[in-house]
Structures are given as structure tokens and as C-alpha cells.
Image (spheres, rainbow, N blue to C red):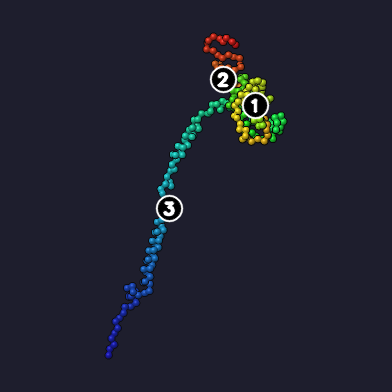
């Protein structure tokens, strides 16, 4: 009695070619999904970085210097074309001031400490210098150089100031006293209650030198300075009745 034969099964290599056999076939979908996920993650990371770091196109553009140059231009032009103040220049040429000297200070007008130990009085020091510069015409008209040592005394107890010519100047006498009185009228009224001071009486001094009048002022055809003894030129009319 013959035994029936079994159907033949495909060999193992054939099964592997069909994708049925082997243990590694099931891992391929997971690997593909992992690769896709990595690519998507890189794309999601790269796009924001690109948008953040992308060039704006203005790095190499020339800076707009029009507005600053326009702003500076008027100030430069005005500085170059602004005329000098004629009054300040004329006063600087007509009088030269020395530094303000603190002569003495103390509890009374007769005695006191030497100027080296006296405290400063900025208000009065500035006032006397300004009054001399602003009142150059107070000086005597002699036609030659001269100087007056203006002395300013300050009495805080009586709240008074006085200006008189000292002994150091070359001009003295009534003309110098008249100039000192004229300078005193140019002082501003002090705020006695608000001024800081250590003593009741102070003496300050400023030497003012007045150069001789410029040669242009004495040129032919110009008026002679007062006191020179030369009458002013006339226009051909009759001579003056009194010399």
C-alpha cells in the first residue's frame, strides 16, 4: 500500500523574496515614519530660523545723512556769518581791567583783616567790573592813556556801598572822583538779606586802564576830544563869538 505524498512547501529563500519570511520586514514602516518625523522636525525648526535671520536688504544701504547735515548747516552758517558785537569790542579796546583785589575786611570800617583772609563777595566783584566796562565814558577825556584804581567799600551793617578813586591810579582829583561816582551809579541794587558774608565791612579794588584814543578818532576832519582846546571844524560859517 502506497503512502500519499505531501505537497511540497516553498523553500525559505522563496518566502523571503515574497516578503513573508524573516524577522526584519516589520521594522521598515517604523523606520520610514521616524525618517519622515525627523524631516518634518528639521523643516519646522529651519523655517523660523530663516525668517528670523534672513537679511532685510538694508545692511549695505547708505546712511541717510541729509537730516543731520541740514540740522547742522544753519548753526555753522550762522556762526560764520554772525557779526561780532560792536559794543563789547569797543569797550574791550577802551578799557582794560585788572583782577579784583580784596583789600581788607573786618568788623569796622577802620580796622580789619588783610585781604588774603577775606572771603569772596562774588556779587560785588562782578558788579564793579561790569559797571566799569559798561560806563567807559565815565573816564576823564584827556586824549591820552590813564588809569583809575576804583575802590568799592561794602558796609553790611548800614547796607551801603561807596566807590572812590584809590592812590594807585594815574588819574586823581575831581576828574577821578567824578568817574568813580559815575561808575557807582552803574551798580545794581544788592539783595542784602541773601548775600553770604563773614564780616561787616569789605574793601575791594579794581585797576582800570584807559588806552589813548585811536588814531582814527583824531584824524583830520573828525571832532577833537573834549578838553583838547581845539574848536570843532565849521562849515565855512562865521567864527564863534567866544573862544
The reply to whether callout 1 and callout 3 are in contact (CB within 8 Å) is: no
Q: Quadrant of the N terminus?
A: bottom left
Work out which residue is located at the far right of the displayed protein and give it. 111
Disc 3/disc 2 C-alpha distance (Å): 77 Å
What separation in Å lies between label 1 and label 2 (alpha carbons)?
Answer: 30 Å
Numbered mark located on residue 12 in the image: none
Q: Residue at x 33, y 78 (%)?
A: 11
Identified at 63% across, 24% down, the residue is 180
Give coordinates of residue 76: x percent, y percent. Answer: 49, 34
Q: Residues within 10 Å of mark 2 (few under 14, many from 20)?
A: few
Relative depth, front residue between 4 and 43: 43
Residue at 41%, 50% in the rendered image: 55
Q: Which residue is mark 1?
A: 163
Mark 3, residue position: 53
Q: CA distance from mark 1 to mark 3?
A: 78 Å
Residue contact between numbered discs 3 and 2, judged by CB atoms under 8 Å: no
* Mark linked to residue 217: 2
| Foreground of the two, 119 or 88 | 119
The percent coordinates of residue 87 (x first, y second) are 55, 26
- State left or right for residue 111 relative to residue 188: right
Is residue 197 rendered to the left or right of residue 39?
right
Question: Hey, which residue is sitting farthest left in the picture?
Answer: 1
7 or 82, nearer to the observer: 82
Which element type, helix, strand or loop, lies under badge 3?
helix
Q: Earlier in the sequence, mark 1 or mark 3?
A: 3
Q: Quadrant of the C terminus?
A: top right
Label 1 Cα neighbours within 10 Å, binned few <14 / some 14-19 / many ≥20: many
Nearer the N terminus, badge 3 or badge 2? 3
Residue 70 in the image, given as x and y percentages of width and height: 45, 37
Q: Position of residue 135 (x, y in %)?
A: 59, 25
Amino acid at each position: 500500500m502506497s503512502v500519499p505524498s505531501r505537497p511540497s512547501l516553498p523553500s525559505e529563500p522563496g518566502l523571503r523574496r515574497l516578503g513573508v519570511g524573516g524577522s526584519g520586514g516589520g521594522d521598515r514602516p517604523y523606520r520610514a515614519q521616524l525618517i519622515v518625523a525627523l524631516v518634518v522636525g528639521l523643516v519646522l525648526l529651519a523655517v523660523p530660523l530663516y525668517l528670523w535671520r534672513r537679511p532685510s536688504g538694508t545692511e549695505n544701504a547708505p546712511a541717510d545723512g541729509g537730516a543731520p547735515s541740514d540740522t547742522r548747516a544753519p548753526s555753522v552758517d550762522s556762526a560764520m556769518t554772525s557779526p561780532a558785537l560792536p559794543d563789547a569790542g569797543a569797550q574791550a579796546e577802551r578799557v582794560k581791567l585788572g583782577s579784583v583785589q580784596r583789600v581788607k575786611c573786618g568788623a569796622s570800617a577802620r580796622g580789619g583783616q588783610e585781604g588774603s583772609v577775606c572771603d569772596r563777595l562774588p556779587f560785588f566783584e562782578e558788579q564793579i567790573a561790569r559797571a566799569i566796562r559798561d560806563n567807559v565814558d565815565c573816564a576823564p577825556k584827556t586824549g591820552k592813556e590813564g588809569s583809575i584804581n576804583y575802590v568799592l567799600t561794602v558796609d553790611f551793617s548800614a547796607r551801603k556801598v561807596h566807590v572812590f578813586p584809590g592812590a594807585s591810579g594815574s588819574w586823581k582829583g575831581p576828574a577821578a572822583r567824578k568817574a568813580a561816582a559815575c561808575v557807582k551809579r552803574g551798580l545794581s541794587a544788592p539783595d542784602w538779606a541773601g548775600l553770604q558774608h563773614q564780616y561787616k565791612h569789605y574793601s575791594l579794588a579794581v585797576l582800570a586802564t584807559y588806552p589813548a584814543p585811536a588814531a582814527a578818532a583824531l584824524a583830520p576832519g573828525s571832532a577833537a576830544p573834549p578838553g583838547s582846546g581845539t574848536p570843532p571844524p565849521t562849515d565855512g560859517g562865521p567864527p564863534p563869538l567866544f573862544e
